[in-house]
Amino acid sequence: MYKYKAANKNIEISNPDKVLFPDIGFTKSDLVEYYTGISACMLRHLKQRPVNMKRAPDGTKGGSFYQQSAGNYFPSWVETVEVAKSDGSLITHVVCDDKKTLAVMANLACITIHIWLSRTSSLENPDKIIFDLDPPEGKGFRLVNFGAQKIRIDTYSLPCILNRDGIRDIIQPDMDDEEKKLFMESAYVLRKYLEKLDI
């Protein structure tokens, strides 16, 4: 166990050397460092929104489950919000507003963070819409490209953000070598550019 320090909080990371992504040897401590390293970008999308956590304690090859409620093992300083269920009972969601909460969720092997489309201040009024574009089996990523461009054109100049959930690879088998090279170069340039920005 080691401690990760963020915003004057020491967060204990259990089993830091546990491999979560066996294909690349990416460990839990790597996940903590990665999430906190890109926190400035991630928190723009997470702040003030309840989250559902997809956890994979035994890594991506060991199965996963969804967790909505903040267990009693969450530190008391983690922000939460109570949401009424249809049966009248309450469920306490985590609200990830800072880097230290990201570290806590990474320690729980939260691989994917699903946000609500509404904010804690107005849970019944979503201010975001998501178009989930998955190409039909056997079709290439170009179809997703086309759909995304059409949505952007047809949304009456509303702000659009491209998100990738990581379930399917953007680099598809039907890409030729030149397309793959161009994509990888673009991704590298974008990453280096984002590193220079305080966003």
Image: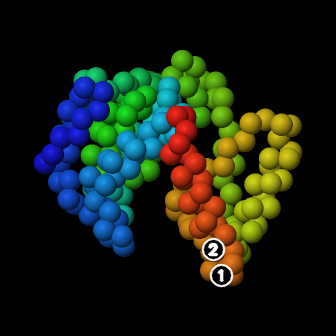
Q: Judge whether 85 appears above or below 20 on screen.
A: above
Vertical relation: 181 (above or below) 9: below
**Closer to the camera in the image, 121 or 27:** 27
For the C terminus, the quadrant is top right
Q: Helix or strand or loop: what does disc 1 sit on?
A: helix
Are circles 2 and 1 on residues that touch, CB within 8 Å?
yes
Looking at the picture, does residue 42 appear above or below residue 9? Answer: below
| Residue 95 showing in the rendered view | no
Q: Inspect this view and state whether residue 189 appears.
A: yes
Spot occupied by residue 44 in the image (x, y as percentages of width and height): 54, 33
Q: Is residue 169 above or below residue 37?
A: below
In terms of image quadrants, where is residue 38?
top left
Q: Residue at x 58, y 48 (%)?
A: 193
Return the mark for residue 177: 1
The residue depicted at 54 percent of the width and 53 percent of the height is 191
Label 2: state its secondary structure.
helix
Q: Is residue 154 left or right of residue 30?
A: right
* Residue drawn at (80%, 49%) of the image: 151
How many numbered discs, if any? Answer: 2
Colouring convention used in this rendered image of the protein: rainbow
Residue 57: x, y in percent? 27, 56
Q: Residues within 10 Å of mark 1 (few under 14, many from 20)?
A: few
Label 1 is placed on what type of residue? Asp
Return the residue at label 2.
181
Q: Residue at horizontal 68%, vertical 57%?
A: 133
133 lies left or right of 77: right
Q: In front: 19, or 41?
A: 41
Left or right of 32, for residue 148: right
Q: State the residue in front, 25 or 196.
A: 196
- Going by the numbered disc 2, the residue's amino acid type is Lys
Residue 108 location (% of width, % of height): 28, 46
